[in-house]
Each structure stands twice: as structure tokens, then as C-alpha cells.
Amino acid sequence: MKIKRILCIALLISLIAAISVSAQTEKDLPTNEELTKFLEGIPKEPGFISTAANAAVKEHPTWPWDKWTNSISFYYENVGSPKGYGSIYFDDTGKKITPSCVGGCELLQSHTGLEKAEKENKEVKETKKDTKKSKQSSLNIVKEQKTDEEEKLDEFMKFFENKDSVSLEEIRAHAKDVFFGDV
């Protein structure tokens, strides 16, 4: 029963750690202010889409953006939105535009954040490592309990080493003292 309780506690700790890791990785969107400040530093001229995409990969690799045939869209945190994020679209000259596919548009590239994925993989590996350590710790506790049981059995058997005969009453009393004395 103790073993089950220990294993359940170890699994709960692992689950809590995994949940907290996933909650932390969801906040990789910039604020609207951070995104605006970053985009202000990029010259508003023809080729803006490529320039902005390259700058975003270099300076903020975890920020998501989409490159379309006629625009680029950047995403920012917006807790007031049902989706939890907002977006800003720019044409190839750096002019802010409304999202539109009039005349057709096609998604050319979707950047979800390279470092974000690497960071998540690293955190998952660390969580697995922590889980493995918890399981090993639980196994060590079980081994210690087995060792404790073996010691009790040795103590019980020593009682009989120097005796020629023992009554059933003596065996019961000694067993109770040795095995159930700590209950």
C-alpha cells in the first residue's frame, strides 16, 4: 500500500511539472508594443516582407509570423481576444494593411518559432529525466523497505537459533513484536 502511495505521489509531481512546463511555453508571443517597436526599426521600402522576415528570424526567432504572396503577418499577445492573440499585416512596401486575399493569396511560409520548438523539446526531455529520477527514488524506497523486511526476518529467525523448542504462544508474541511493533 505504501508503494502505491509513493508511486502515485511521484506521478502527480511529474504531471504537475509537465503542466507547468506547457503553461510557460505558451507565452512566446510578443506584446503589441514589442512587435510595433521591432517593426518600426525596419525600413518601409520595397522588399519589406523579406527584410522583416529575416530580421524576425535573427532577432526574435520564437515570434510567429506568416509570409503570404502579397503580405506578411505578425502575431502578438492579445488577452482580450477570444483567440488570445492579434495580428498585424503589411504589404511589400511596409504599409500596414487589412487582412485580405482579394485577387488571391497563398501562404508561402509559416514561422512558428524555431527556438520555441527546441526549447519545448529540451523541457520535455528534462521532464522525462525528472520523472525517471522520481521513479528511481520510488524504487530505492521500495528496496529500502525490502531491506527493512529482510532485517525483521533475520531478527525473527535469531530468536530461534539458541532454542531447542518454542511454543506457539512464543512464536506469535515474537512475530507480533518484530513485524508489527511499529504499527
Image (cartoon, rainbow, N blue to C red):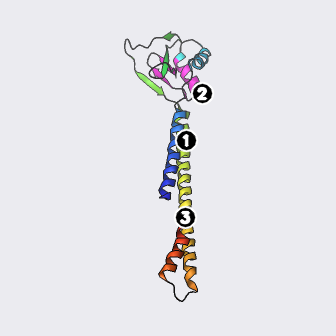
Q: Residue at x 52, y 71 (%)?
A: 176
Which of the two discs, 1 and 2, sits closer to the camera?
Answer: 1
Secondary structure under badge 3?
helix
Secondary structure under badge 1?
helix
Q: What type is the residue that disc 1 sits on?
A: Glu
Up the image or down, 131 lies above or below 49; here it is: below
Q: Is residue 72 magenta?
A: yes
Instruction: Looking at the image, tell me whether mark 3 or mark 2 is earlier in sequence order.
Output: 2
Horizontal arrangement in the rendering, residue 172 relative to residue 43 (left or right) = left
Extreme residue in the front direction: 169
Tag 2 residue: 58
Secondary structure under badge 2?
helix
Q: Nearer the viewer, residue 66 or 63?
A: 63
Q: CA distance from mark 3 to mark 1?
A: 33 Å
Q: CA distance from mark 3 to mark 2?
A: 55 Å
Magenta span: 49-76
The mark found on residue 145 in the picture is 3
Q: Residue at x 55, y 83 (%)?
A: 160
Image location of residue 145, percent across then percent down: 55, 64
Instruction: Looking at the image, tell me whether mark 1 or mark 2 is earlier in sequence order.
Output: 2
Q: Residue at x 60, y 27 (%)?
A: 58
Tag 1 residue: 123
Q: What type is the residue that disc 3 sits on?
A: Gln
Image location of residue 183, percent across then percent down: 54, 63
